[in-house]
Every structure is written in C-alpha cells, then in structure tokens.
Amino acid sequence: MKTQQISSKKTASKKPSLKKMSVKNIASFGPTTIGIDIGDQWSQYCVLNGTGEVIEEGRIRTNAEALAKHFQDMDPVRIALENGTHSIWINEQLCGYGHEVVVANVRELHAICRNDRKSDKVDAEKLARYARLDPKVLRPIHHRTVAQQESLTVVRARDVLVRLRTSLVNAARGLAKPCGFRLPPCSTKSFHKRCLMILPEGLKPALKPLIEQIEQISKQIEMFDQLILQMARKTYPETQALMKVHGVGVLTAVTFVLTLGDKQRFGQSRDVGSYIGLRPRRDQSGSHDPQLGITKAGNGYLRSLLTECANHVLGPFAKTARSGGGD
C-alpha cells in the first residue's frame, strides 16, 4: 500500500518532459524567436515560442552546412546573434533564408558580457528573450557584405605586413646599438639598401637575414598597394570622390568605403563620426556633466588613417601654407 502511494506521488510531481523536436517543426508554436551564441566550432541555440517558453535548446556546428540543415526550410523567424568573427557570413546566410536577423553588440549589454553565471546556454537564451521583447536593447549592428569583408581583408593584411616591417626595423636598430654600431636614419623603403651596404662583418650573420626579410615584406606591401588601387578604380568607384579631398589617398578612401558598408543606413553625415568613435563620451548625472574624450568605438584602423590625413592637411603640406594663404 505504501509502495503504491509513493509511486503515485512521484508520478504526480513529475513534470511533463518537453518532446525533442527539430528546429524545422516549431512554426506551429506561434511567433518564434531564436538566440544563437556563436562559438568557433560549436554554436548554442535557444528557441522561444510566442509566450516566451523555451521549446528547444541545443547546439550545432558553426559551418554553412549545419546552418542550412537547421534553418533553410524554416518559416521566417527572428534570430539574434552575437557579434563576432563568424557573425558576418552567418548573418548573410540566414538573411538569405528570409529570416529577420539581429546582430547584437553584446559589449553594450552588461547583462550578457558581465554575467556572473555566464555560459553559452545562458547567453543564447538571453539573446532570444531580448530579441523577443525589444531588439533595440541589443544595440543591433549592421554588417557589411561578405564580398566587402573579403576586400577589407586585403587592407587588413597590408596593415599586418606594415606593422611587421616596423617591428623588424626597430629590432634591427636595437640589436645593432649594443655592439657600438648605429644604423643610419632612412625610410623603410630604402632601409634594406642602405643598411646592407654599411653593415659590419660581425653583425651580418644576425642582422642580414632580418634586413633581407624587410626587403621581401616591402615588395609584398607594394603588391597590396597595387591591388588596393585596382579595387578603388574598378570595384569601388565611389572612392574617387573621396580622393579629391586634399590629404586623402587611395588607402584611406578604400578603407572608409569598406568600413562603412551600406552608406544608406546613416541618416546624416554626423552619424558616421559617431560610428567610428569620433564623438565625445558622456557621463552626465544631475548637474554633473564633464567634458570627456572621444569614445574610440568602431574601427580603430580607419580612425588612425583619418588622423594621419588630418595631420597632413594641418601640417606643412596644407594647401594654405603652400599657396601663401591664411593670416
């Protein structure tokens, strides 16, 4: 008798288990929202129905085949992603299936990025819940296309070589000084020619390979410069208008166009300055409203290029200085 009572109590207290479902077959539950926490190898997802109940959780491979298997045949839904390395191509693929994709800037959302119980499962559910209630809370990011990202990769690869060449030049100068020898001041383009000619015999075994590597990197940078010039002329003709501004060259114009992506998403030109972090930060509370520096948000490389252009315009190469204008 007691055994029957215990078994009946256990049966009564047990919650009905959620039937394991495929993501393709959840449209019957009403408006659906999905949150995906993207990982390098695996991505965690959480599916909410129209009433906010979790109807499925799981993980899928972070590749195009797995995304197609799970989302291609599904009715259009709202999907929230984390901004990251893979979000550009995932966003484009899911939009191609007709879904409404919200790419969240989770750095602006401390409830996700600074959560004391942070996990892929928790993050995916929070993304889904925020997207279901109000996508604007996620501070959505508008990604450029994959084709634009591929072109921008050329610019970034060039930047990697430039920084690598600078490190090698500094290393060669620093290694020579303790031996009582100072390499001559010169531009990076002529560094290998001048230094190899006057390099002492005792330093050649150590520094000659470095200087020869600098020569090879300089040639590769020139190849990237030609490729970027071709992109400006053929693929992105809108850069020609930017290059008419004094101090703006091909590299800055191409980087500017590719970083902004779709220019129609900016309501006014001032929005571009905020997008690349050139607006002042603000920390106002009551009568306390201090003047702060710029936010430095967005693309730091583009911001550095624009700073160089400004220094060129305001420096000794300014048109007013050459033409004798000004006070």
Image: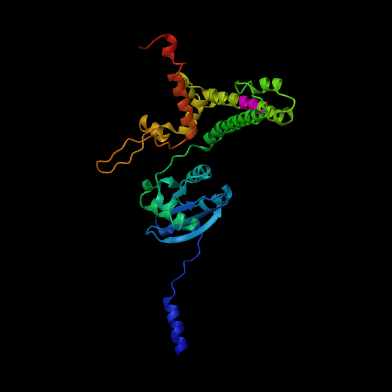
On screen, residue 110 above or below 210: below
Which residue is outermost to the bottom?
1
Q: Residue at x 68, y 29 (%)?
A: 179
Q: Residue at x 51, y 51 (%)?
A: 71
Tally of marks: 0
Q: Nearer the viewer, residue 158 or 151?
A: 158
Q: Quadrant of the N terminus?
A: bottom left
Q: x, y percentage for residue 23?
A: 50, 57
On screen, residue 265 above or below 85: above
Q: Quadrant of the C terminus?
A: top left
Q: x, y percentage for residue 69?
A: 55, 52
Q: x, y percentage for residue 66?
A: 57, 51
Q: Nearer the viewer, residue 152 or 49?
A: 152
Tell me the magenta residue range.
216-223
Magenta: main secondary structure: helix
Q: Residue at x 42, y 81 (%)?
A: 9
Q: Horizontally, is 319 left or right of 283 in the view?
A: right
Which residue is outermost to the left?
287
Q: Was residue 218 drawn as part of the magenta stretch in this picture?
A: yes
Q: Nearer the viewer, residue 258 or 186?
A: 186
Q: x, y percentage for residue 108?
A: 40, 46
Q: Nearer the viewer, residue 98 or 146?
A: 146
Q: Is residue 298 visible?
A: yes
Q: Residue at x 45, y 22 (%)?
A: 311
On screen, residue 287 above or below 230: below
Rendered image quadrant of residue 213? top right
Q: Is residue 32 visible?
A: no
Look at the image and name its color scheme: rainbow
